[in-house]
Amino acid sequence: MSVLIHFSLFPTDKGTSVSPYVARSLRIIRESGLPYKLGPMSTALEGEWEEVMAVVERCFRELKKDSSRIYMTLQMDYRAGAVNRIEGKIKSVEEKL
């Protein structure tokens, strides 16, 4: 099952700047080898269901090590047989402009 997600995960008990914690998650995402795209408010990640959810769980467990409160949003789109949707969806819209 191929999925495209975008998610945001950060501690709420670490003050106003949480970029060091986001960077810790991004390191996990990068090391996963899955296609991803960092955005200003979330990260898009594409792959098989089990792979993608394992990355999300690893990110959560990393922040849980030293955070007592974590906020996460996650949206997912499944489309059978679709690949390279991180770039493809954007390209499809831009072609119609």
Image (cartoon, rainbow, N blue to C red):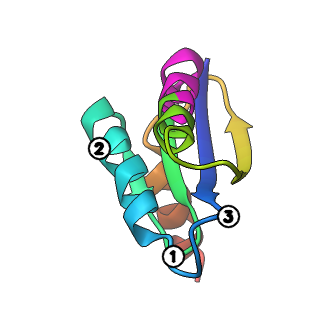
Based on the picture, tell me whether residue 55 belongs to the magenta stretch: yes
**Mark 1 or 3 closer to N-term?**
3
Residue 1 x, y percent position in the rendering: 61, 17
**Left or right position of 1 against 74:** left
In the rendered view, tell whether residue 71 sits above or below residue 57: below
Q: Residue at x 71, y 41 (%)?
A: 76
**Left or right position of 90 against 32:** right
**Mark 2 or 3 closer to N-term?**
3
Q: Report which residue position mark 1 lands on.
A: 40
Q: Alpha-carbon distance for marks 1 and 3? A: 17 Å
Q: Residue at x 73, y 47 (%)?
A: 75
- The quadrant holding residue 92 is bottom right
Based on the picture, tell me whether residue 84 belongs to the magenta stretch: no
Q: Report which residue position mark 2 lands on.
A: 30
Give the magenta part as a residue range. 47-57
- The quadrant holding residue 19 is bottom left
In the rendered view, tell whether residue 64 sits above or below residue 16: above
Find residue 2 and name its label. Answer: none
Three-letter amino acid code at disc 2? Arg
Which of the two discs, 1 and 3, sits closer to the camera? 3
- Whether residue 33 is visible to the viewer of this picture, yes or no, is no
SS at badge 2: helix
**Mark 2 or 1 closer to N-term?**
2
Q: Residue at x 58, y 71 (%)?
A: 41
SS at badge 1: loop
Three-letter amino acid code at disc 1? Pro
Q: Report which residue position mark 3 lands on.
A: 12
Residue 64 x, y percent position in the rendering: 56, 39
Which of the two discs, 2 and 3, sits closer to the camera? 3
Three-letter amino acid code at disc 3? Thr
Q: Residue at x 29, y 43 (%)?
A: 30
Specify few, some or many for label 1: CA neighbours under 10 Å numbering under 14, 14-19, or 20 or more: few
